[in-house]
Amino acid sequence: MQPRDGISLSPEGRVDRLAARLSVLGLASVVTRREGCIRVEAHIPHVLAPELWRELFAVLKTADRFGLVDSSADGRSVWAGVDDKTPATVHAARGHGHQP
């Protein structure tokens, strides 16, 4: 579910949406705050179907940054960071009227 054109989501709203989409994929997430960023982390099971990887990356690319951690001790996990200062706008309002 995407927000309507021109609607901005707060950083917290973006994180909530990201965590909810991870939950739909069957991944439990943990949300933490760092200076300037809200971070969402989720553990990846050892076996994940290829189509779920595609959906997972579609979810992660909605963040401002993301990564994959592959650790022999803990297995794999993903993280996504959302800047806590600027909300994301789905589509810019440019093109509506005169702009200098």
Image: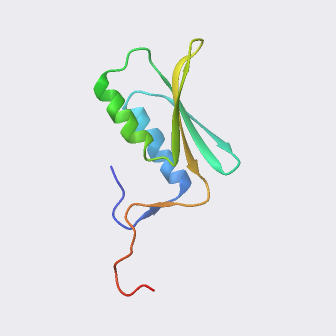
Q: Quadrant of residue 69?
A: top right
Q: Residue furthest front?
A: 100
Q: Quadrant of residue 50?
A: top left
Horizontally, residue 5 falls left or right of residue 30, namely left
Q: Position of residue 30 (x, y in %)?
A: 57, 33
In the image, is residue 41 above or below residue 37?
above
Horizontally, residue 45 falls left or right of residue 71, namely left
Quadrant holding the C terminus: bottom left
Horizontally, residue 17 falls left or right of residue 52, namely right
| Display colour scheme | rainbow
Horizontally, residue 22 falls left or right of residue 74, namely left
Task: Name which residue lies at 71% across and 48% down.
Answer: 35
Task: Name which residue lies at 33% across and 35% down.
Answer: 55
Q: Residue furthest right?
A: 35
Which residue occupies the foreground of this view, 75 or 9?
75
Q: Residue furthest left?
A: 51
Q: Position of residue 8 (x, y in %)?
A: 45, 63
Q: Position of residue 64 (x, y in %)?
A: 52, 49
In the image, is residue 3 above or below residue 42?
below
Q: Quadrant of residue 25?
A: top left
In the image, is residue 13 above or below residue 86?
above
Task: Name which residue lies at 37% across and 64% down.
Answer: 91
Q: Position of residue 28 (x, y in %)?
A: 49, 28
Which residue occupies the foreground of this view, 90 or 19?
90
Which residue occupies the foreground of this view, 43 or 95?
95
Which residue occupies the foreground of this view, 12 or 89?
89
